[in-house]
Amino acid sequence: MKISFKNDYSEGCHPRILEALTKTNLNYQNGYGLDDYCAEAAKIIQEKIEKQNSKVFFVSGGTQANLIVISALLRPHESVVSANSGHIFTNEAGAIEATGHKVHAVETANGKLKPIDIQNVLDVHKNVPHQVKQKLVYISNSTEIGTIYTKNELENLSKFCKENNLYLFMDGARLGQALMAETNDLSLKDVAELTDAFYLGGTKNGALIGEAIVINNPDLQVDFGFHIKQKGAMLAKGRLLGIQFLELLKDDLYFDLAKKANQHAMKLKAAFRAKGIQFLADTFTNQLFPILNNQQIEFLAKDFDFYVWKKIDENHSAIRLITSWATEDAAVEKCAEKIGELF
Amino acid sequence: MKISFKNDYSEGCHPRILEALTKTNLNYQNGYGLDDYCAEAAKIIQEKIEKQNSKVFFVSGGTQANLIVISALLRPHESVVSANSGHIFTNEAGAIEATGHKVHAVETANGKLKPIDIQNVLDVHKNVPHQVKQKLVYISNSTEIGTIYTKNELENLSKFCKENNLYLFMDGARLGQALMAETNDLSLKDVAELTDAFYLGGTKNGALIGEAIVINNPDLQVDFGFHIKQKGAMLAKGRLLGIQFLELLKDDLYFDLAKKANQHAMKLKAAFRAKGIQFLADTFTNQLFPILNNQQIEFLAKDFDFYVWKKIDENHSAIRLITSWATEDAAVEKCAEKIGELF
Amino acid sequence: MKISFKNDYSEGCHPRILEALTKTNLNYQNGYGLDDYCAEAAKIIQEKIEKQNSKVFFVSGGTQANLIVISALLRPHESVVSANSGHIFTNEAGAIEATGHKVHAVETANGKLKPIDIQNVLDVHKNVPHQVKQKLVYISNSTEIGTIYTKNELENLSKFCKENNLYLFMDGARLGQALMAETNDLSLKDVAELTDAFYLGGTKNGALIGEAIVINNPDLQVDFGFHIKQKGAMLAKGRLLGIQFLELLKDDLYFDLAKKANQHAMKLKAAFRAKGIQFLADTFTNQLFPILNNQQIEFLAKDFDFYVWKKIDENHSAIRLITSWATEDAAVEKCAEKIGELF
Amino acid sequence: MKISFKNDYSEGCHPRILEALTKTNLNYQNGYGLDDYCAEAAKIIQEKIEKQNSKVFFVSGGTQANLIVISALLRPHESVVSANSGHIFTNEAGAIEATGHKVHAVETANGKLKPIDIQNVLDVHKNVPHQVKQKLVYISNSTEIGTIYTKNELENLSKFCKENNLYLFMDGARLGQALMAETNDLSLKDVAELTDAFYLGGTKNGALIGEAIVINNPDLQVDFGFHIKQKGAMLAKGRLLGIQFLELLKDDLYFDLAKKANQHAMKLKAAFRAKGIQFLADTFTNQLFPILNNQQIEFLAKDFDFYVWKKIDENHSAIRLITSWATEDAAVEKCAEKIGELF
């Protein structure tokens, strides 16, 4: 079998999570998220972000988190602004629209939204009430193409949103990887300070399932549980989510795993760079998008699984390589070696 | 701490499931339900129901299963008929209506729908197109009050639905317990034969999470995966669901656990009967609804946790006791003993 | 052709409306409700209710008004309480549910909701967040069976709603008829004072189309126009609605027409009473529900069109007779005469 | 007051319509579209399109027609492809998304969709079931920028849609104007032949309100009335729609009015051309988009009302001039004269 760099959810979970699930398995707990583990995990998150007033809610996956947060925050006539590479725009089977809300997609160079991008959308939607009303800005960090927001960029976005009465929501399916990138200058506390809501992704960073939604804006916390229930996302055995996040966050396992994923990617990046190969975007997280010629792609495809992401010209395409905490060192080494053999 | 008979989802999962998750943990698998375990579990279900053409889909929980199936099967102007004790009517935070569909609730004596109940709804909705159009009948087996459908009853319902162009959908959150009841004469194969769709509940019968939706009507299978994705129910690590159902179904663990839950309840039932105590409904599954006077309730509440389900008169209420595969023999014995002390 | 008492929308409109449409036909006006006529008609309504801060919006019909108001006022997890005879529950093809909201139907003796009815719904929905949250009370005045609310009844409802954080919304498709009933003690001003929103029906009282939605609660006025547009209810030539309401309201034509409709009905009522005939409900508006035996029904059906409303027993049913401003005196006289011949 | 070329819905209706409404005003008719006038108008449309099996439904306005047709035709996971100038994408307050469906917007040179545009959308949505499924193509004729489809273009689109299992739906808010353009080679019969559904706009061509939806694909006709009712679009006095379309279509009034509107525009177009002025798109219907410099715009704005449509550069913008059947000859002449004075 080939070694796979196709995604970061092909294995189960970090072994410590299975141990924690096993150890607590027969403890009697309240259902529906009212168990001790969820409470404890929420408390740790509140401490890490230094916001006792933020509320934490655990759900199973990213699309679920996105559709619940967005539909809970918006009234029927309100819409979302997203990068056109945004997960909600491209890969969620119309989930946001299915809750009744339009997603405005903005072309970006690198998956990141800037105030001017949002302003451009606002500018062509001034014909009240004939046009939909923009109310929420959706960003991902790291983005769908592996880039990250700097602190300054996020501050600017946050300021712009406040000035324009827009909510700022960060999809953090790979937030761990973003925060552990070597070029990152954002803290988890900054994220909580600068957004109305965000989530901390577990599925792609060591958990079996699970995303921790954090609502920072107190107005938006009201009745939030109803939305989780109504969308079918409230697990009877909510402990499954609480135990996992508790295990990931009680020490720094969550961040260690993200760091390891990034380091794997950086090794491959160095190997590509050594061959003078260019990238679609300069990424420092666990996703790489090197631009190869067709023979090079064919050569790597003999030993490795990956997606061909974007055709550049007849003879070149960007491929996507993803690493994770579960990627083995030997796999990275073998891949780096093969990259070294590219011609 | 008191012994709890409040519900059947207060513990984790059957230990064999954790073992299976651990053993397979680092196996590389495709995401989003395309893993080997889901495929194998689906195949076992097809074999058990003797219908190779039924399609199996795994989701996380009951409300999720209900809202996905119902919204996938109906067009916007179509509605659902349910018992007024139906989970979708009482306890899902308006999840079905949130997908756009009305739920007609029918009063029933014992949680079970009869053809006449549905006919009564049809009869008062003949003013086309001013009134909503009934298209799906929702039943639970076992029902929310622990009763079960006989084969004859299900055949009659199925026939009625076919004659009236209605889909028949069975919520099987506790289908294992229904099929293992000592009075049951339905087989899993019968269920598949007589319904358009049903699901086999894992959460309340040994799994951490998971319901196996089975679509028998081929017309209704088309594009079903889109609905799972769109509602945020498609787990990246779908293996979590597949592994659990594989473990529960590869031998008869699923049915053994349900049987054990029922047996616990039958022991308590016998204890109540021995004291001449009546029940709200005569149940043979893992839910009991004995009618007690207030002093009796107070007496039991000293040692046990349970819900007071329904007030009967000033001095009497029905309580609900639920047992599960995880209920300990000693707990049942102690409870039976205390029931014996009722005065 | 038989004389029809089937409904109050079988003719066009009051001739004065056609005259007004003709006179203003080629005046240049802004579209989408921003014309002078809408502004003037809104101002007259504000004056009549003595609330300069209420906002008035014109739409085409009753179902449209109901679905726009309800979906604009509620968040996704919130529901509506209605009498089970409520138009939104029985005759709007699931329009409210199609916007995502559950309608709780309460059995009533006479089509009118009382605080205790609502309290009963609240009492069985305390399991937060597993059950839908009640947020709006929908009443009709006159009701679907012709009865009306007294001032005291509406005050009690209003007080109960405020105490329980519920919005109170009155469907006024036949509000004119209610306010002109000889037993009425409510004023239009009272209605505006005691409800969060209501509408004044034009379609069933002299207009071709048109209902005037009045939002009294300032919090609920925000962005309301977006909802009208989004539901396809904002007419390009909004003048059509403005001109009609202006003509109906600039003097008391609206109320005169309602009074005339009621008087017609009261003549028929007297004729039934003279024969000792009972009614389903004692109504003083333009709807009558006399209980007749089958031969009597057959006798009247020879000359008149009407609906058989409700079977009482094998030999008796209540029929529904509706009069309107357009009903001719001669028709009423002939009907009264035939009623006199009942045996 | 300035002469307005802002839109084609600033006056009431053609006088013959008011005469017809007046003449029929007190005729007793069934409600909800079951009146004789609707039936007769529908029959005339069936005859004009030579398709006895097409079904005709009358609603009030364009956004309403669009949202009803689209939501009735699609299942929850299906989406719409539109030009990015499409009315549903830009100017309907998110109405389509509010019914749950994503609208894919395609950049076009002239407001018209080509098969390749749709193919491009299909090409990037092959990741089943993670991406929404395209099922309906929405086009406008004339388009929002006044251009029209040739017969050959519509045949190509129709063929492409059939080959790709896509429905083709034409927004005909200004279909009369399209069919009466001097460059048009499409007949109403062609439109019915080549689309699954379309509508014939009344509001912008002589009626007070009203669009005639024509469903050609028999599969899509089933239960269509329910959707009209559920969206609040079924008028109690449906006669208002029937009478208008009957009057417009019983002879060729509908087409004469459209022709007149076009002729007005062509006179202005000739005046611009005489001055060597270029247009955003070369249109032959009642919308013109001349590109003027700022001084020219200022000059015309002294006497005429119009929208500045699109900024071209610092010193130039395209303006939009719209004419209608109600535009007076003198207004056109005066405007042509002033155009002649442009420098």
Image (cartoon, coloured by chain):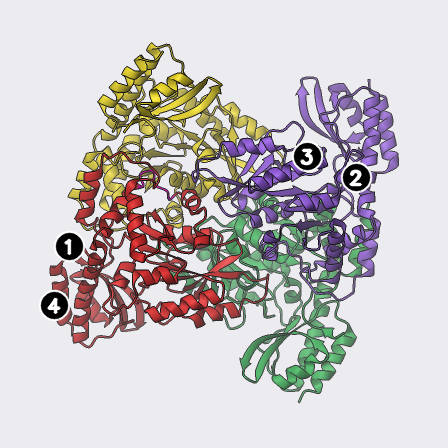
Chain colours: A purple, B green, C red, D yellow
Q: Position of residue B308 (x, y in %)?
A: 61, 75
Q: Which mark is residue C1?
A: 1
Residue annotated with mark 2: A180
- Chain at tag 2: A
C92 with respect to B198 (left or right): left
Q: Residue at x 66, y 42 (%)?
A: A170
Query: Which numbered disc, 4 or 3, marks the residue closer to the eye?
Result: 3
Residue plotted at (69% across, 66% down): B8
Numbered label attached to residue C203 = none
Q: Which residues are magenta?
A: C233-238
> Magenta stretch containing residue C161, yes or no?
no
Identify the element where label 3 is drawn.
Answer: helix
Q: Quadrant of the N terminus of chain B?
A: bottom right
Task: Tell me the SS state at disc 2.
Answer: loop
Q: Are marks 1 and 2 on the same chain?
A: no
Q: Chain of mark 1?
A: C
Q: Chain of mark 4?
A: C
Q: Which residue type carries mark 4?
A: Glu
